[in-house]
Amino acid sequence: MPIDFARIPRDALPALLRSAPKAELHIHIEGSLEPELIFQLAQRNGVALAYPGVEALRAAYAFTDLQSFLDIYYAGASVLIHEQDFFDMAWAYLERAAADGIVHAELFFDPQTHTARGIEMGTVIRGLHQACERAQQQLGVSASLILCFLRHLSEEDALATLEAALPFRQLFVGVGLDSSERGHPPEKFAHVFARARAQGLHCVAHAGEEGPPAYIEGALDVLQVQRIDHGVRSLESPALVARLAAARVPLTVCPLSNVKLCVFKTLAEHNLPALLNAGLCVTVNSDDPAYFGGYLNTNLLATFEALPQLGVREAYQLLRNSFEASFVPPAQRDRWIDALDTAFRAAAV
Ligand code: HPA
Ligand code: ZN
């Protein structure tokens, strides 16, 4: 039976968005480190921070672009030393995810941020993986890991990173590409993505956040990615939009991130409605929730509040896309979509 969207009032959306089952596909786990946990870990590990306290650190979260954020984000990650620290960070996120109705999360992590400080690859991956395992057992949340290469570093460094991670191949499902986009086109990482594909790893890449549509094309053509992270600048190229729509390439869009990093001036000016109208498989995500003003439900609620042209149908489509774009077996994906349908049907009056 189809869902009768006309019978679901728009003012039912906040509660429905909060409680409905959903997946998160674009969350940098180091970007979930709240200032309180940063200071707790700094004290536990004897790491000195450039800020006197939580309030001063939070006050520094006034970003002008991607790079101004990355500088402070990498500094925050410097408190992570032991396996337990990586576990604690991921567990804190997964508990919040469960409270947001997230039933599946694919977590990005940036190993080079840690290995460059002398932390072993195994320390990073084992700590994160144990949190994912416990989330399944204790929270009923499915979670998997995607290893991201830092694009401001060389491809040689990325290749060495992938080699160091291969002993833990069973503990992550894919590779991604993040950090400073401008001046670091996807083509720079052709070999390391080919090597990852040969290992059967899923491939995604940040593209078209600050970079031009050509970077999205490069990620598709050269890296052969299955999803584009952000991708909001795709609208500048009608040919690219047609291609993304025809191939149903998902775009993992992060509305609050885009406003904090000045990609859009306000949420009301975000092009998410236009992306949906163009027939693209868009999902909503939190990116770096501790830095950008909120977790997934906060992103969803703020987006629907700022953009009145988005209705119940669009809410359903965005949540459904989160499952369709995920790297889970089709039978599991279909069970979650059934649960989503049930939640929307129950909201009809
Ligand atoms: N863009 C690129 N790199 C990142 C981001 C982002 O939004 N967050 C963490 N690393
Ligand atoms: Zn991101």
Image (cartoon, rainbow, N blue to C red):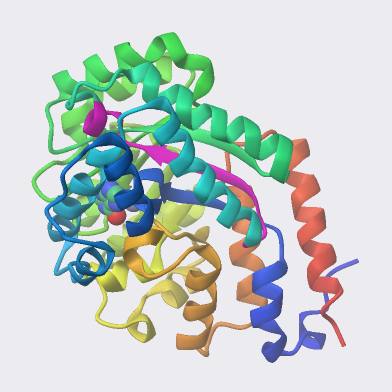
In the image, residue 166 above or below residue 331: above
Q: As rendered, which of 85 and 225 lies closer to the eye?
A: 85
Residue 28 percent location from the top left of the image: 38, 47
Q: As rendered, which of 235 and 41 lies closer to the eye?
A: 41
Q: As rendered, which of 4 and 349 lies closer to the eye?
A: 349
Q: Is residue 203 visible?
A: no
Classify residue 67 by image quadrant.
bottom left
Q: As rendered, which of 263 and 88 lies closer to the eye?
A: 88
Q: Is residue 105 visible?
A: yes
The C terminus: image quadrant: bottom right
At 26% from the left edge and 22% from the top edge, which residue is drawn? 119
User: Which region shows up in magenta?
Assistant: 100-114
Question: In this view, which residue lies farthest toward the left?
Answer: 183
In the image, residue 330 above or below residue 251: above
Q: In the figure, is residue 125 to the left or right of 187?
A: right
Residue 111 percent location from the top left of the image: 30, 29
Q: Magenta segment: does it hold 266?
A: no
At 82% from the left edge and 87% from the top edge, which residue is drawn? 7
At 53% from the left edge and 16% from the top edge, which residue is drawn? 170
The N terminus: image quadrant: bottom right
Q: In the figure, is residue 344 to the left or right of 62?
A: right
Q: How many labels were placed on the picture?
A: 0
In the image, residue 260 above or below residue 104: below
Classify residue 315 by image quadrant.
bottom right
